[in-house]
């Protein structure tokens, strides 16, 4: 075996030491520097105990003493759609489909306080849904779904706060009924539609009667107005005649009466059977009176 000179051996030993130190430094730097992605948080432990939670970016930890125990995604997650049975306040069995969205905001609570976070949230949601629906009737569940979702989300948020979780959204996708209940509701709906149709028809007939009565009342009012106008006209004519009599005297009135009698006898003479004229008693006096009045006016 060939022996190296003492100087060469010392040089090789020094280089090996330098290489070892360089490797050690690289390992230390590699274990000390942690680059955390934007969508994650790292949970760091030291000797099995929580040391720190690293946020996104470059982080420095103690090499060989600290280690990244958990890499937690902080992206929003969606639980698989779950179905649970519930009984309403009016004893109707329904099957509710729910979906929950959440994200982890405090990983140190999530990794040390709960083992299966998805299963825990699903179980909690099922219990809250049964509890909330049990206080409502079926019609309220169908019509106040937004209010029900809000109550479920608030109740769920209070429960999962200890797990470092934020519930971002909770949805009720559907409320299903069994066949018997659905058939009964359909029958009730048809009956309600028939009742509304009858009410609408009755209201239409009543409105038609009201309109007919209003028309008759309007016609009666217009007829009464016409009679009142005629009466006013006759009263005005009578007043005019009375005023003329008062102004021209009684002779003017007698003159007009005599003229009317003469005109009446003339009409009778022009009619059929004009060869024979029947004169009423006093006709001669009427003629004489008329001639006398005519002569006097001339």
Image: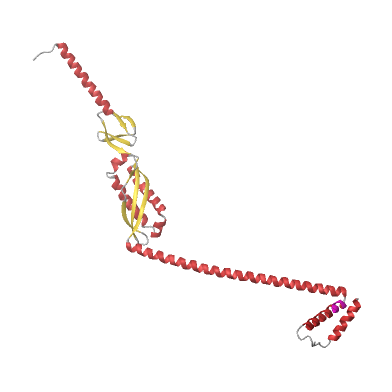
Q: Is residue 222 left or right of residue 27?
A: right
Magenta-colored segment: predominant secondary structure: helix
Asked if residue 252 is among those painted magenta in the image, a careful observer would answer yes
Name the residue: 33% across, 64% down: 180
Judging from the image, the colouring scheme is secondary structure
Q: Quadrant of the N terminus?
A: top left
Asked if residue 225 is among those painted magenta in the image, a careful observer would answer no
Q: Quadrant of residue 208?
A: bottom right
Q: Position of residue 122 (x, y in %)?
A: 31, 49
Q: Quadrant of the C terminus?
A: bottom right
Q: Is residue 276 left or right of residue 146?
A: right
Which one is nearer the viewer's eye here, 279 or 204?
279
Q: Position of residue 260 (x, y in %)?
A: 81, 79
Q: Is residue 255 left or right of residue 197?
A: right
Q: Which residues are magenta?
A: 251-255
Task: Identify the residue at the far left of this view.
Answer: 1
Q: Quadrant of residue 133?
A: bottom left
Q: Position of residue 240 (x, y in %)?
A: 81, 72
When the figure is inspected, residue 53 is found, relative to residue 271, above or below; the finding is: above
> In the rendered picture of this protein, how many numbered marks are placed on residues?
0
Whether residue 220 can be seen here: yes
Q: Is residue 59 left or right of residue 2?
A: right
Q: Position of residue 94 (x, y in %)?
A: 34, 58
Which one is nearer the viewer's eye here, 264 or 136?
264
Name the residue: 31% across, 51% down: 82
When the figure is inspected, residue 220 is found, relative to residue 23, above or below; the finding is: below
Name the residue: 86% across, 78% down: 255
Whether residue 137 can be seen here: no
């Amino acid at each position: 075996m060939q022996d190296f000179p003492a100087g060469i051996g010392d040089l090789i030993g020094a280089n090996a030491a330098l290489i070892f130190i360089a490797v050690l430094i690289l390992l230390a730097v590699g274990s000390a520097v942690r680059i955390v992605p934007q969508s994650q948080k790292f949970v760091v432990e030291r000797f099995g105990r929580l040391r720190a939670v690293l946020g996104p970016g470059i982080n420095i930890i103690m090499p060989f003493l600290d280690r990244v125990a958990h890499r937690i995604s902080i992206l929003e997650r969606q639980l698989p759609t779950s179905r649970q049975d519930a009984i309403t306040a009016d004893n109707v069995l329904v099957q509710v489909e729910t979906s929950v969205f959440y994200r982890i905001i405090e990983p140190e609570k999530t990794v040390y306080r709960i083992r299966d976070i998805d299963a825990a949230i699903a179980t909690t949601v099922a219990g809250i849904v049964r509890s909330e629906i049990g206080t409502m009737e079926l019609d309220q569940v169908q019509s106040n779904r937004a209010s029900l979702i809000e109550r479920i989300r608030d109740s769920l948020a209070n429960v999962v706060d200890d797990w470092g979780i934020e519930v971002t959204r909770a949805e009720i996708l559907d409320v299903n009924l069994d066949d018997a209940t659905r058939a009964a509701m359909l029958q009730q709906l048809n009956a309600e539609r028939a009742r509304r149709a009858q009410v609408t028809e009755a209201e239409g007939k009543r409105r038609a009667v009201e309109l007919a009565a209003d028309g008759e009342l309007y016609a009666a009012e217009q007829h009464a107005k016409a009679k009142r106008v005629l009466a006013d006209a006759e009263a005005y004519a009578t007043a005019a005649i009375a005023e003329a009599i008062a102004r021209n005297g009684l002779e003017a009135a007698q003159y007009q009466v005599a003229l009317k009698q003469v005109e009446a006898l003339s009409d009778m003479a022009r009619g059929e059977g004009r060869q024979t004229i029947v004169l009423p008693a006093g006709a001669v006096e009427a003629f004489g009176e008329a001639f006398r009045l005519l002569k006097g006016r001339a």
